Structure formats: structure tokens, C-alpha cells
Amino acid sequence: MLMVRMAAVGYTSSLVPKEEPDMTAHAIPEGFAPLRRSSPLLDLLGPVYSRGEGLQLEIGLRADNRHANGRGTVHGGVLATLADVGMGYAMAFSSEPPLPLITASMTLDYLGAVQVGEWIEVRLEHHKRGRQMAFATVSVQVGEKVVVRANAVFAVPQARD
């Protein structure tokens, strides 16, 4: 009875087997390659892809069932993580050596839903870096549709003498 009610309102349960989408049918867009730098969290989310370098770096991910919330769309936390990584990596790797930026604050506006199987891209829109702080804005997109806009402030750690 509970599972029937949950299904009626759009929720899924881990007790109900889910069909895995055929990810082989979804090619990775041209120019994207596995992200060269990763972390334990990105290893769990990934594979994560990238295209471009420095401030032109774009991050990409093919959403699958691991990324879904109870309603069957991609969880906002996954989108927030991709936005944070997209901003941080683009800003950090625009310098040589890369800057060890620390996210101080981040705000997101969720503008649409992402479905399992869709290709997600993160693109840097605006940036500014000072000696102690850096600022960035990204769009998270599915095709031409912006699904998240995020802004962040990063601390730029100072070298210790």
C-alpha cells in the first residue's frame, strides 16, 4: 500500500527494481574527455568529463539513476556539486601554478529539472579574482536550457612565510 501511494505521487522506492537507462545509447559530446583531476566525491559521481582549459573549462556529466532523487529527477545536490567544481576548477586552473581556492559561499537558483539520461554541462559565465577573494558565476545546462545558475565566492589562500 505504501509503495502504491508513493508511486502515485511520483516517488520511487529502493525496494522497487528500477530499469537502468541504456547509457551506451548516449554518446559523450564531441571534445569532452575524462576530467584529468578528480576527488573521491567526483569518483562516486562520475565519470565526469571536461572540455577546454582554464577559464574556458566546461564540466560534463551524463546523469544516471545514481544521481536521482525520490522523484526520479537529478538531485539538486548533484547539480550544486557540479556547479562548485565547475567554478572552482575553471578559476583555479586559469593560473600557473593552479590556485588552491576554497569555496567560502555559494548560492544557486534552480531553474529547471534534469532527467536521468540527460547530458549536463557547466559553463563559466563571469569571473573576477583578487588577491584574497575570487568570484564566479556558472550556468548548468541541458542542451541550451539553463537549469541552474550559481554564484560563488572563493577564498584565495595566502602563502605562509
Image (cartoon, helix red, strand yellow):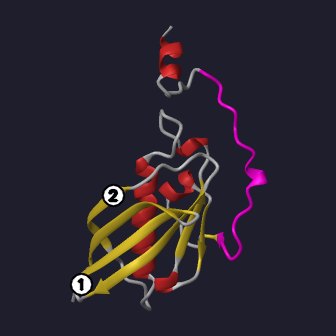
Q: Position of residue 148 (x, y in %)?
A: 41, 60
Magenta stretch: residue 17 in it? Answer: yes
- Principal SS element in the magenta part? loop
Q: Residue at x 71, y 42 (%)?
A: 21
- Is residue 149 visible in the rendered structure shown here? yes
Q: Nearer the viewer, mark 2 or mark 1?
A: 2
Q: Position of residue 84 (x, y in %)?
A: 39, 65
The residue labelled by disc 1 is: 158
Foreground pick, 90 / 72: 72
Magenta stretch: residue 123 in it? Answer: no
Say which amino acid is labelled 1: Gln
Question: In this image, 122 relative to 133: left or right?
Answer: right
Q: Earlier in the sequence, mark 2 or mark 1?
A: 2
- Dot label at residue 109: 2
Say which amino acid is labelled 2: Asp
Q: Which residues are magenta?
A: 16-33
Question: In this image, 49 relative to 74: left or right?
Answer: right
Q: Residue at x 45, y 78 (%)?
A: 90
Residue at the extreme right of the image, as rendered: 25
Q: Position of residue 6 (x, y in %)?
A: 48, 20
